[in-house]
Amino acid sequence: MTLVFLAATVISLVNPEIASQVKTYGREEEIRAETLQAEQDVPVVGKEDIRTGFLDVITGYQPGTAGSSLKRAVAAMHVLDFCRIHYLAGTDKEKFTENLLSAWNELPDTEKELFPELFASVSGQIEEDLQNSDALSGLFDDAGILEEMQELLQEENLRSSWAVLKECAGALK
């Protein structure tokens, strides 16, 4: 019975609709409550963490300087790590966007003006990293981030967390 309950719990976390089809010996409500609790346990990232872990990373990247491709790779790694640490795939996007906009409003105008170009560059690097990481191992190694990127790119929810950040960053204007 414990094995059935465990299987039903796992299934409910992956697909709650299937959970209703699993024989759970009358524990459906308990399983639904655990699933709801797991979804609510992902804290929304605060504006200070957004500022230091995302916005400052992007605005701190300086294209057109010596080693800018290495700096862009490092910035991309930090943004992906921000996505991983805060599990953005499971966060409340509306509240996250509110905090993102709050942090954005505190940026100096000069940083706001540079942000779209800098974000596009780092975002392009991230997309390339996610699609073709093996070909970029030389770049990661030169930037001193090979091991970190190899570990990051193995993260199960990294791509979906990055997609959430990209979507929410679309509100920055």
Image: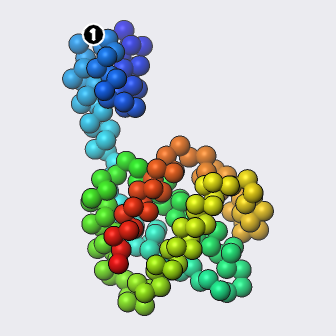
Extreme residue in the bottom direction: 110
Q: In the rendered view, how is the structure colored?
A: rainbow
Q: Is residue 164 left or right of residue 32?
A: right
Rendered residue at 31%/16% (across/down): 21
Q: Nearer the viewer, residue 69 or 84?
A: 69
Q: Which residue is mark 1?
A: 25
Q: Position of residue 109 (x, y in %)?
A: 38, 89
Quadrant position of the N terminus in the picture: top left
Q: Is residue 173 left or right of residue 111?
A: left
Q: Is residue 85 visible?
A: no
Rendered residue at 34%/15% (across/down): 22
Q: Amino acid at mark 1?
A: Tyr
Location of residue 105 by image quarter: bottom left
Q: Secondary structure at mark 1?
A: loop
Q: Is residue 130 visible?
A: yes
Rendered residue at 32%/29% (across/down): 16
Q: Position of residue 111 (x, y in %)?
A: 44, 86
41 shown above or below 67: above
Within-10-Å neighbours for mark 1: few <14, some 14–19, many 20+:
few
113 shown above or below 118: below
Q: Position of residue 169 (x, y in %)?
A: 39, 68
Q: Position of residue 30 (x, y in %)?
A: 24, 24
46 shown above or below 107: above
Quadrant position of the C terminus in the picture: bottom left
Rendered residue at 32%/11% (across/down): 23
